[in-house]
Amino acid sequence: MAKSALANALKERSAKSATQSADVNDSVDEAFEALFGAAAPPAKKKRVTMELPIEQLHPFRTSHIGFKPYSQENLKMLADDIAENGLIENIKVRPSEHGYEILSGHNRVAACKMLGRKEITADIEFVDNARAVVIATVTNLQRRQSLLPSERGWAYRALLDAYRQQGKRSDLVTATCGEIHHKLKARERVACFFGVGVNDVRQTVRLTYLIQPLLNAVDERKLNMMCGVALSYYDPATQSRFYHLLKTEHRRLPVDVMKKIKQSCPPPSISAEELDKAWKTAAEQLSEQKNGSIRFSRKRFEPYLHRIPPDINIEDLFLEFLQNRFADGEQP
């Protein structure tokens, strides 16, 4: 999270402190019902709020909810805010065999450790795996000011996996989205609840099938996200070959080059020799096309296009303009 974004989030958090806890619980309940098509099952025991020893807390056991911890700079900012204003929002945990799993609040725990605190106020939730996943994902997806593509991808995937593990059909289930009733797939339910497109869910989830170096490259904006989605359909060995060429030979991978590679060498596998040849061929073809054509932004010409008769060729019209403009050797 950017420093300025975190600072704004901390200000908003302080302003909303009176209703924060109730809002979080309501949001989780709404998310569960929207995503699973039924009200959340009653908890085994009623929620308990108490001070817990920090040494008894450990990360949520679901390994692939990939929210990254704050940088040291942002963690220090959060710690300073807690020192000044207190822990405005309790962390959420659930009992485990070796203490308590942190469902929401990993960074708050780390900030309290930085302050040298031994205990932290926690809401202890006695919930099953599906509800635990909803708590762990929804609170972050709705509250964090900025999330990396990989963080959103792993969160969406965790929700989809939890849905399927509930034993429900993932093809047709009755759902409510606003005032419109649909029969939605699991992916559509997730998109509907978070107000994003189904393609956004599908594409970000596909990123979780990338090898870690390529996923890092997408997060760092060194690799176009759509290229990452295309690469996710290849097996790990082929992905490693792509990364090797990107890293060692500093090759560029524009979307158009990726499309041509995928057309000539479809997933799931490409040999090193095939990839090298396909990549070079695609780059050369696009270079030739670029050198042989001129592009203009349609948006800039939009106000005039409707005035051009349908039988007039725009290329001929533009050429006529240039010939008239420079007929006498006039300088531009």
Image (cartoon, rainbow, N blue to C red):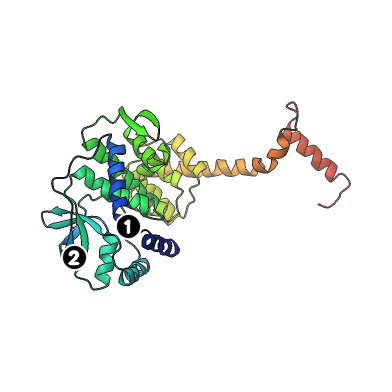
Within 10 angstroms of label 1, few (less than 14), some, or many (20 or more) residues?
few
Q: Position of residue 252 (x, y in %)?
A: 49, 51
- Spatial distance from mark 1 to mark 2, Cα to Cα? 20 Å
Q: Position of residue 256 (x, y in %)?
A: 52, 41
User: Compared to 93, does 112 lie above or below?
Assistant: below
Q: Position of residue 191 (x, y in %)?
A: 38, 39
* Badge nearest the viewer, 1 or 2: 2
* Residue drawn at x 16%, y 57% as measured from the top left: 100
Residue furthest right in the image: 328
Residue 147 vs residue 45, the one in the foreground: 45
Q: Is residue 330 left or right of residue 36?
A: right
Residue 136 vs residue 26, the one in the foreground: 26
* Residue drawn at x 37%, y 60% as measured from the top left: 13
Residue furthest left in the image: 97
Count of all numbered marks drawn on residues in the image = 2
Within 10 angstroms of label 2, few (less than 14), some, or many (20 or more) residues?
some
* Residue drawn at x 75%, y 28% as measured from the top left: 309
Q: Residue 54's mark?
A: 2
Choose the circle earlier in sequence order: 1 or 2. 2
Whether residue 84 is visible to the viewer of this picture, yes or no, is: yes
Residue 189 vs residue 282, the one in the foreground: 189
Q: State the SS at label 1.
A: loop
Q: Amino acid at mark 1?
A: Lys
* Residue drawn at x 28%, y 65% as measured from the top left: 87
Q: Is residue 224 left or right of residue 85?
A: right
Q: Amino acid at mark 2?
A: Ile
Whether residue 233 is visible to the viewer of this picture, yes or no, is: no
User: Compared to 207, does 166 lie above or below?
Assistant: above
Q: Are marks 1 and 2 in contact (CB under 8 Å)?
A: no
Q: Position of residue 47 (x, y in %)?
A: 18, 52
Kindly identify which residue carries mark 1.
68
